Image (cartoon, grey):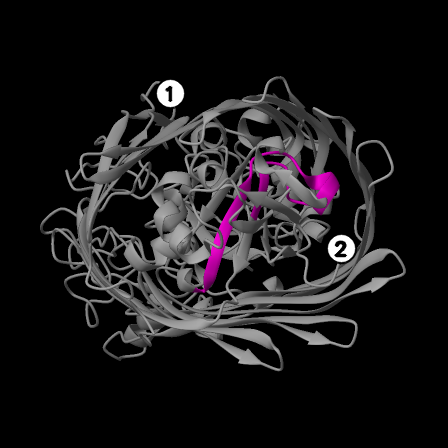
Amino acid sequence: MQFFPGAHPLKLTTIRQSVLLGLYGSAALAFAPAAFAQNATAPAATDATIQSVNIVGSRRVGNTSSTDTPVPVDYIPLTKAAEQSGQFDLAQTLANISPSFNSTRQTGADGADLVDSAALRGLGSDQTLVLVNGKRRHTTALVNLFGARNRGNTGTDMNAIPVLAIKNVQVLRDGAAAQYGSDAIAGVINVELRKDLGCEAVAGFGEYSKHDGKNWLASAYCGVAVADGVLGITGEYYDRGRSNRSDPGSLRIIGDTKSKNETVYLNGEFPVGPGKLYVTAGAQTRDASSAAWARGGIGSDDIPSRNSAAMYPGGFVPFINGDIDDRYGIIGYRTRIADWASDFSQTYGYNRMRYDIAHTLNASIANLDLINGGKGISPSQFDAGGFSFRQLTTNADFSRFYDDILGGLNAAFGFEYRKENYQIFAGEPGSYNDVDGLGFGGNAGSQGFPGFQPGDAANRDRHSSAAYLDFEADIAPRTKLQAAVRHERYSDFGSTTTGKVAGAFKATDDLLLRASASTGFRAPSLQQVYFSSTFTDFVAGVPMDVVLAPNGGKVANAAGIPKLHEEKSKSYTLGATWTPTKAISVTADLYHIQIDNRIVLSGRFDADNYPALGAILQNLGVGQAQFFVNSVDTRTRGLDLTASHRTNLGAGKLATYLAMNFSKTEVTGVHAPAALAGYEDVLLSERERLFIEQGGPRRKATLDFDYTLGQLESDFRIIHYGPQTLGTFSGPPVPNQYYKAKTSADLAFTWSFTEKTKLTVGGTNIFNVHPTQQNPDETDNGFKYESVQFGLNGAAYFARLSHKF
């Protein structure tokens, strides 16, 4: 999507220093000082532009002020975050800056403990498209299940990219499927990587107030001149320790997972012939470990079905260890063909997760050993299998600006071909086998996480192709109009066409009115279509196979589950920006998002809650079954507000920033397939409905005060989270879990020894605020509160040292 050699595929525009502080959302205040120091190219006292900034959401090239953008965009420079933030990974960094962005670390949620899911505007994690340098980034192989927010969703692992490698993050808070394709229902996040000259190193340490969850960070960036271009190289080692908030004397471990990340990223651009060659390559290996539910010791209800007296007489906690590999690469070439700026690129993405279950046992193996005269011993570690996802995306994009049509017309068109592969790997037999055949409930397979069976194994492919047209014009001196249309065809479910119109009207020199309307879609992920998991449960001592049945398989077909197809959306925004002075900026945007046929994971169907279907399942050797189905309609309404102000205060400078998001998602309809008609309460229970409607808080606000006096900078940030209501296992008349509104605060001090060396010390959640306590028998993780709002770990303290070479 490049328009001339050296241009970026997204909008190239100019941002004035005052506007950069105020207009583009969460970084406007929080990280502006460091961004100015790095990016300034003109005297601050003049009205000249200081930096060309690429903004997601437009393909126009020109010197248009950012105040003219027809859709809301948060522009977040990350230089300061990399040097001074109390959060060491990208997801948590953004969650503490952007009100519309939510990411909460899970606990007791199996694989979802190992990868932080993230979402915009209270929608699902797979309804936000993530780009890197304007190119689609792959999702993870993981489907969030069993206790996770965003359950049934896939998502993008934001933490696979080191913060020091990032120049800025742009958050487009508007539906953009017509511009960028599937997944962009809630919006688009574009991560722009660094390729500036110079070197920098950052070292950090942090821990919770209970002296656990120790974090160690060592990160370095170096941009070097190569072949008349620049190659930026980032390497990072991040060691995150386990935390535990369980009650004294409990076997449970409730808190952050243990994780070691080793990451390297390259990003560069080089002149070749009449154009420029650009490359991006990234790789991360992550060794993560999550604590599963504890198994009781001698005398507990878990004996003899889930334990062995010879191995763990006092009980044990199984560990779900994840070996995660993530790879990403882009190679492309920008040039001119006649009067058209052209960009040809190939993107590669790969994510693989394999499970190794440790400090565990297969109780059926231990029991058989005991029957045969042994001590009752089982292996204590199993390869439980795993899954992978690979994505190849080919793009050809063309753009041309006509300055003699209207007040200026930018025309763009392009083509995309994408190929995807999803695999499930079976574990070793001991990770899933029931070898004693005695039917003790839940004794088969590795405790904590039963392995994938050979019947679950899959190797599935699909491909899609797309074409788009995009226009942006100044139809009058004060009026801008955008229009886009996109057609996509998928090999597995068919085709879809989406469109978008957006406009901006400059009512006065200070006031801009803007609006947009669009249709959108999200293709069912291969993970949702083909994920399969089989495990054994026992009812009255009788073994019963439970299947999470893949779409199109014999179990799903026998149950009358139709083929998955795309979710469809309609999105509307209406907003305004007000910039009365260079020091003040205010934005407000209302939005309405309607999604039809959202894909959800059903409840369990069996002979008790649906006798006719239960009989069909039993004939197939299945006792209970769950399915992914297109069955839910939702409506999301909300308001985004931002306001910023800069002033001199005493001998120093104070920058103040306020950002708020109000969002409400409601399930407006449940449409069961014909075979499940009348059983909507099983298909979507109240508990599952509340996860959709209130998986994230319905309001969030950030108020930040940044004061600089000489070599000392202080930053005080208040983060408010609205209440949440989640369901219970028992259901009515047991009351739902109600989490009261909570307010957290972060405080940091930075001392600049020189222009190149800085030390930051501070704390996050300094008042040690926790979620509202609940009945642990009714929570998803079996603890006294869920990992909601800002998490469950409490206060933390940190120190960072940065140096530029």
Picture coordinates of residue 706, whole percent (x, y):
27, 40
Q: Secondary structure at mark 2?
A: loop
Percent of width and height locating residue 517: 70, 26
Disc 1 and disc 2 in contact, CB within 8 angstroms: no
Task: Residue 531 in the image: state x and y as whole percent.
Answer: 60, 55
Residue furthest left as drawn = 248
Q: Earlier in the sequence, mark 1 or mark 2?
A: 2
In the orientation shown, which residue stands out farthest toward the bottom? 227
Q: Residues within 10 Å of mark 2 (few under 14, many from 20)?
A: many
Measure how far apart labels 1 and 2 are at the Cα level.
58 Å
- In this figure, which residue is indicated by the disc labeled 2? 3
For mark 1, what is the residue? 732
Left or right, 271 with respect to 363, comes to right
Q: Amino acid at mark 2?
A: Phe
Residue 491, quarter of picture: bottom right
| Element class at badge 1 | loop
Residue at 22% x, 47% y is 793
Amino acid type assigned to the residue bearing label 1 in the image: Pro
Q: Residue at x 16, y 65 (%)?
A: 313
Residue 384 circle label: none
**Can I make out residue 770 in this image?**
yes
- Residue 180 locus on image (x, y percent): 70, 46
**Front one among 292 and 258:** 258
Q: Nearer the viewer, mark 1 or mark 2?
A: 2
Q: Residue 340 in magenta?
A: no
The magenta segment is: 165-189
Q: Nearer the viewer, residue 485 or 78?
A: 78
Dot 1 crowding, Cα within 10 Å, few <14, some 14–19, many 20+: few
